[in-house]
Structures are given as C-alpha cells and as structure tokens.
Amino acid sequence: MSFEIKVKVIALETGRGVKGLTVEAYDADLLHDDKLGVGETDSDGSCRIPVRLGFFSLDRPDVYLLVKSRAGRVLSSTRGAFLHDVTKDVSIEVPIPCFRLVEAGVLARSDLPPELASVTVAPALRTLTLNPSASTDPLRAEIERDQANAATVLELLKRYMDALRTEADNQALPFQKLGKLFQLGLDLPALEGHHYGVALGLRLSGQSHPLSRLDNVVGLLWGATLQDQSPWVGKSFHRGDRAALRSAVGGEPGPSAALLGINHFNQLGWHAANNISFHALTWWLNLQDAPPEEQRAFGYDRNGGHFVAGLAPSVCAETPRQVLSLNYRWPTLGNRPPLSWLIDEMVQIAPGLYLGQLLFASHRLLGRFDARRPPADYAYQHMGYFVLWNQSWNSEARRIFPFLEVPVTAPGLVTAGPVAPQGSRYRDLKLDSRPPAACNDRVFAELKADLADRETVLHLLRDYSDKLQDSLDNSSPLFLRLQELFNRAAPVDAMRGFYRGALVSWHGAGLLDLFSKNALDLAWKGFAGRLSTWTGKSFDPISRERLRELTDGFETGELPSTWGANTQALRTMKEREVGRLMKLANIWTEPASQIEAVNCGYDLKNFFFIAHAGTSVNENCAGKRIYQFNYRWPKLRTIVPDRFCIDELVQIADGLCLGQLMYATDLVKPYDPRQPPAAYRYGMFGYFLLMEEDWHQLRLRLGFDLDNV
C-alpha cells in the first residue's frame, strides 16, 4: 500500500507559506509512533511525503505531522488531531502562529504585517539595565545572547535556575553569569513594601579549590528537593525610625541602616518536600502566621527571619562594590543559625528586578556579631543567588514560577481604577434592532430595573452570578432575565484576538434538569472551579483550505469564519497538574507563543472550534442572530462532553459579550450540520462572558469569578 501526504505549512495570521521547514510524518500508535517519511517545505510552504508500506501490511496508519525548524525546534504537532486509518492520498495544512515562527528564527519581525509587528513584550520586561561604563567581555556578550532568546529578563534567570538544578560544579557557567550580572548591576533605589522572590541556585562555596567543581552537595540537594517548591517566597521592607532601628541593632544604628525587613514563607498543600521544610523552618526560625490581610493580598502563610537593610560596601571579597546589605546578624533580631550568620546583598539588573547573593560567615560563628570588625574576620562564603522583584513583574512571575502561587488579584495584576467607572460604555446595553419573537417585555422591565440599581452591567452580572451559585436553584427567575438579556442583545459579526472569560452560572438541562438543585453549580463550587485553568478564548484567521479540511468540505469560507480556541493558564502548581492530566487525556493542545504568554496570561490553547455568524440552536431564542462556536466537527477531535457543544455569543455592552453553552442531549445521533438543531435536542447548560481588558480589570476589582482568571 502506498499513498502521498501533501503538506502545506502557513503562518496562521497571514496565510502565507513558510519555506525551509522540516516536516516529519508519523503513524500514531499506543506504544511507539513509527516514522513514515520526511520532507522540506518549498517557497510556498508546500511539500510532498510519499509513504510506502509493506505489500502484506494490514496496518492503516493514523497520520500526524511534526514541523520543525532547521535547528530542530518543534514548531507544531498535529498528533492531537491525527488522520485516522489513512489509505489514500491526503492533504494536511499546518498553521503556525507568526510569533512562534519569529521566536524560532524562521521569520524576522520585519516580515510580519504592521498590526503584528507592533505587538511586543513591554521593553521594561526585556531590558537589562547594567553599568553602561563597564566594558563588554565574552561573558557579558554571552549573557546578552541568552537574553535575546528569552521573552523577559525573569525568564532568562529561570533558565539559569533550571541549568543549576543538578549542577555539582560550584563554578558552573550559570553561576559565573549570575556573578557577572551582579558585578554589572546598578545601585538599588530605596525599597519599600512587599517583593516576591525565588532562590536561583545554591552552592557549597564560591571559592575555588581542588574539589570545587564536584562537591556542590548543597546545590544538588536543593535542586532535587526544593527548587520548584521552596517555602521561601519573598521579603518585605519598611523604613524604620531611629528608635526602631536602635532597637533592632541593640545600639546606635550606623549610617547604612535605614530599612527593617522580614521574609515570607508559603506552604504548598500537596508537596512533601515543601511541607517538611515549611514545618521545620516554622519550628526552628519561630515563624509566625502572616496577618489575614497579607495572606489575602499576597498568598503567603507565615513570616520570619528579620533583617536590617541599607546601602553598604559588600562583605564579599569577589564583589568590591556598593550593595543593598540585608544583615540578619544583629543579636537583638533574635535569628537562630544559620540566619544569624547571613548577610544578603542586592543590586538592580532591570527596572524593578533585583539580583541578590547569599553570604554566610564561616569564622567566629560562636562569638557575638560585631559590626566594627572587618568582614575578612568572618570569612564570608558565597553560597548562592536569589532574585526579588516589585509588583510590575508579578504577572510575569505567575507565568514562570507557579509554586509562588501569586494571587490573581496581587498588586501589579490589577490596574488602579474605580470599582464603579463612569460612562455609557459600562452602563448602556447594546440591543438588537431585530430581536426574536421570544422576547418578553415584562422580564426585560425587571432586568432594566435591576440594572438601574447597579453601578455597571458587570456589577449586575456579578450579583446574578453570586445569587445563582449561592441558591443552586435551577429554576431561578434570574435565568429568565439572563435569557432575556441574551435575546435582546446585539448580534456579533466578528471576533478577532483574545478575550478574557468569566463564568456567570451553570444550568442543568436534559437529565440534569430533573434535579431540584443546580447540580453543575454545586459541583463547580465544590471542587471543579478550583481546578479550572480556563482564562478565555482566542480568535485567529483560518484559510479556506484549512476550513474545508476540518469540516469535511461542508464549510467553504463563503461565510467569514475564524479559528477559535479556549485558552488555559498553568500558573500554579495545581494548574500544572491539570495541564498534565490534559496531556494524558490526549487533548489536542497547542502551546502559546511567548508574546501570548507574557501579554495575555495563558500558556496553551485547546478545545478548538470553528466560529462564524449564525442563528441560535436554542428553542427559547428561535431566530436569534448570534456568533456561533462549533466544537462538533469530528476532525476537531474534541473530547466528551464538549464534542456535543455549540457556544453562542451576543454583545451586551461595548466590549462585553454574553455567551450561552448549548449541548446536544441526544448523545447517540452523529453530528450532521444538515440536520435541523431540534434533532439533537440542544439544552442550555450555562452562561459565560467574554470581555476586553478594561472590563477584565473591573472584574478583578469586583472579585468576579476569580477561578477563571
């Protein structure tokens, strides 16, 4: 048996072919995927891969493609949507987001259309601010090359951190690069308030000796146990008056003592190494429960480890410069060893980003600390690096360091603004000029009366959501008002880009309508909501060829359509575990590009759909013009229950859309778009919102559905 795979690789947003990519074809099997052939794309992104199986072969391969750059970087995989039992020639189009092609060096940013070329990561997150007068040496040049391949400076530090995970060499190259960054960093501005932080790498000593490249047992133990689940999560600083400083140092403070500080610690409920170390530190360092307002704002559990901070010369012989010194050694602070032997030192390497080094005394450990002694008397040993940052980095930190469990409402993630913004954008409903006949004037009057008592449309929906999820009443009159709002709202003609999502309420339909309680909201509140990784939906162009392929030729592109996806954030340890379950379930998933991850806050896309304008399948809004998201096409390989789903969307205010979740309750009948919707007995299973960024910021300030942020 033989057949040919005709491949075309295109840039998703432009539809242009991509030249010079390697395409490998595979047969998807349970235990081992067999390679069927390989090709390289030509100037229009096309290639042909001939497949010849043995004459007596009974296998009908399940074909998927891997697309790689010339450097071997995987750019796309179609395994999640493989073609089943292929026996004749097939055509497969593979769209790849432009930003992923830029990140891999396949496209230059100058090749992007203007609307994409202008989208970039904020310069403050990408720029190292180092000593401009220092000369460039090979190590600094290598750091700058590393930075060019990282989305942000914090991502660069995470790569160094990962490289040190199993590093037995105290002088390893990442340690040298961190040392160079510390040497070139700028003096710190005055620090006050809370700062998240992580330890980047630990070592036995920074000094060179015969075994220094082999004996980093501290780093090996740290990397094997606590690196990605450390209980330490940051520090806070506040300016101390003379009396407080005098009490902290047990006498008259020197000119360098200006700030008082404390460390913060977090317990991760399901990680053994974190729990053991958290409780050990609580006992030994006498950690105290953080005040409730700090726990709510920043997510950490306990505080401890006091220090006095101020500008001072470094106590490390290898870094002869001025630093912000964090001194834990004053006896009156009450710190126990090893904290009582520690001095942290910090410099600034990017706006709001601070690199620190850990210096532990190795001499005179049993004597009382005397600040008048020269640092050489204490023989401070360099035992590693850490990083702190201000609130401008908190969103990026959620992406890179999930074990910090930065709350979605932490400072820096919510923009300042009123809880009740003024203006017609936030109060006026957008209405359909031709609403369906199912509209009910009495219910609409009730809805308008409710809105008149609220500051904005979102306040109204937040209140409806709270009442529905608290009452668990599947027959609540609020569902009638939401249905009326949907029926009256303006139709949506097109969607493009990313929209934040929020759940209003689930609703039982079909067999679930037999229960007096809203079983779906009950399950959501009980456990499912806490496992949610959903953040919204994205809408991208789709070529006519790709549209015909995914819909088996039924949709030709005459009706303007988009390629839709649900976006998922893997920004906490729990979310990462959910992401692993998605992978085990073989859900078709595409990773987000760096720019999407940094700017939009999601890490992958899945549960794909075809979207275009249409007519509602809901019998309670017959004839209603809506924007339809169809998950039902077999080649989308959507898993149960979403393979029975059609979402519908309308616009209820400027920048705010209301959606309803329609699921077929006839689960046996195969999907055929030529069949009338009534044949599938669609039921309404809930309401959701899609919104632009200003609405999302208002939603955060209101605390509305934070499970789906």
Image: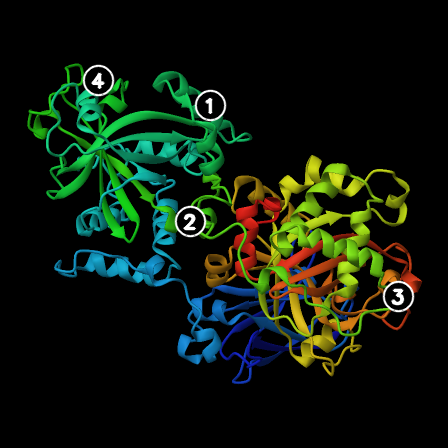
Residue 188, percent from left and from top: 21, 46
The reply to whether callout 3 and callout 4 are in contact (CB within 8 Å) is no
Crowd around label 3: few <14 · some 14–19 · many ≥20 (10 Å):
some
Label 4 sits on a secondary structure element that is helix
Indicate the quadrant containing the N terminus: top left, top right, bottom left or bottom right. bottom right
Question: Distance from label 2 to label 4 (Cα)?
Answer: 35 Å
| 348 lies above or below 656 | above
| 233 lies above or below 636 | above
The disc label shown at residue 510, or none:
none
Nearer to us: label 4 or label 1: 4
Residue under label 2 = 412
Crowd around label 1: few <14 · some 14–19 · many ≥20 (10 Å):
few
Question: Distance from label 1 to label 2 (Cα)?
Answer: 31 Å
Residue under label 4 = 332
Horizontal arrangement in the rendering, residue 650 relative to residue 591 (left or right): right
Residue under label 3 = 677
Horizontal arrangement in the rendering, residue 371 relative to residue 81 (left or right): left
User: Residue sitting at 84 percent across and 63 percent down?
Assistant: 439
User: Residue sitting at 18 percent across and 52 percent down?
Assistant: 184
The disc label shown at residue 276, or none:
1
| 594 lies above or below 506 | below
| Residue type (three-letter) at the residue carrying disc 4 | Thr
Nearer to us: label 3 or label 2: 2
The tag earlier along the polypeptide, 3 or 2, is 2
